[in-house]
Image: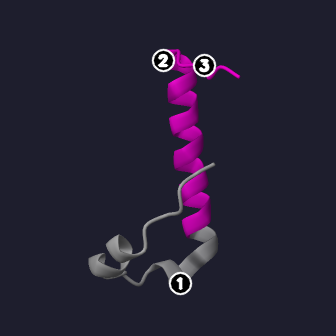
Amino acid sequence: MKVDMSPEAITKRLKQSSELRRLCLALAGERMQKKVPQEEVSANPLPPSA
């Protein structure tokens, strides 16, 4: 499967990601207002994608 890497496709994916991020933050409400210490973020890396 090939991924469309044209400038238009990349821009579209970036805009979708931005919109999804805003939606997630809006839905999370005040739960996401707390700042997570940087040590916790770096100590728990994301699992490798398949």
Q: Are marks 2 and 3 in contact (CB under 8 Å)?
A: no
Query: In the rendered image of this protein, does residue 9 appear above or below residue 45?
Result: above
Q: Which residue is mark 2?
A: 7
Classify mark 3: helix, strand or loop: loop
Q: Which residue is mark 3?
A: 4
Q: CA distance from mark 2 to mark 3?
A: 9 Å
Q: Nearer the viewer, residue 2 or 16?
A: 2
Residue 40: give x, y in percent of width and height: 35, 80
29 displayed left or right of 45? right
29 displayed left or right of 41? right
The first of marks 1 and 2 along the sequence is 2
| Circle on res. 5 | none
Query: In the rendered image of this protein, does residue 41 appear above or below residue 6?
Result: below
- Residues rendered magenta in the picture: 1-25
Q: Residue at 61% x, 60% y: name it.
A: 23
Residue 19: give x, y in percent of width and height: 58, 49
Mark 3 closeness class: few <14, some 14–19, many ≥20 residues within 10 Å: few
| Magenta segment includes 32 | no
